[in-house]
Image: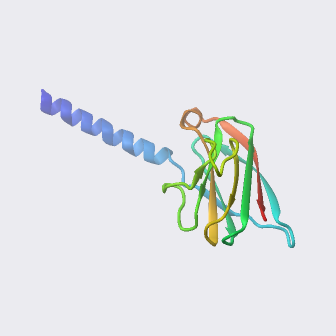
């Protein structure tokens, strides 16, 4: 009895793992380009459900990066990753929580410690993502 219950549990867990892996989507990545001579750029975009949008911003050590997200769905946030790191790794900042580099929710502002491509990952909270909700958003980048 225990052996058959264990087998059923293992099979069910494997099926759930396969289902979850097919639901997860690869991040969509876009390089943020500034107009010639400009230090600001704004992108209008949309994510649905578990979709993730990643924006890469090339910057130099000592520059100041500001990122502001204005989402239609209030369960939409972003993480900031230092060069060489990205989704699935430890984030430098999570714009859901205020801190030294996040003076208010969905607003990042900091002097950059390294040169390279910083990744900004826009996502919806798991509960909203599971419901397949949509978030139209505007994300504003500036480098000083």
User: Which residue does the image show at 77% across and 67% down from the upper left?
Assistant: 33
User: Which residue does the image show at 70% across and 36% down from the upper left?
Assistant: 73
Q: Position of residue 16 (x, y in %)?
A: 38, 39
Is 2 located above or below residue 97 in the figure? above
Say which of 55 and 37 sits in front: 37
Q: Quadrant of residue 74?
A: top right
Q: Position of residue 139 (x, y in %)?
A: 75, 51
Q: Is residue 73 left or right of residue 126?
A: right
Is 93 located above or below residue 3 in the figure? below
User: Which residue does the image show at 80% across and 67% down from the upper left?
Assistant: 34
Say which of 106 and 13 sits in front: 106
Q: Is residue 58 left or right of residue 21?
A: right
Q: Is residue 12 left or right of residue 93?
A: left
Q: Position of residue 9 (x, y in %)?
A: 25, 34
Say which of 40 and 22 sits in front: 40
Q: Position of residue 43 (x, y in %)?
A: 78, 54
- Quadrant into which the N terminus falls: top left
Q: Quadrant of residue 142?
A: bottom right
């Amino acid at each position: 009895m225990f052996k058959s219950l264990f087998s059923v549990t293992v099979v069910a867990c494997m099926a759930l793992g396969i289902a979850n892996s097919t639901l997860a989507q690869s991040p969509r990545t876009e390089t943020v380009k500034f107009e010639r001579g400009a230090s600001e750029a704004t992108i209008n975009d949309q994510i649905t459900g578990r979709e993730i949008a990643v924006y890469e911003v090339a910057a130099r050590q000592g520059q100041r990066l500001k990122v502001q997200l204005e989402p239609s769905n209030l369960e939409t946030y972003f993480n900031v990753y230092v060069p060489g790191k990205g989704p699935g790794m430890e984030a430098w900042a999570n714009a859901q929580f205020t801190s030294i580099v996040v003076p208010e929710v969905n607003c990042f502002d900091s002097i950059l410690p390294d040169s390279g491509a910083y990744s900004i990952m826009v996502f919806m909270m798991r509960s909203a993502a599971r419901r397949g909700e949509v978030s139209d958003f505007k994300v504003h980048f500036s480098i000083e």
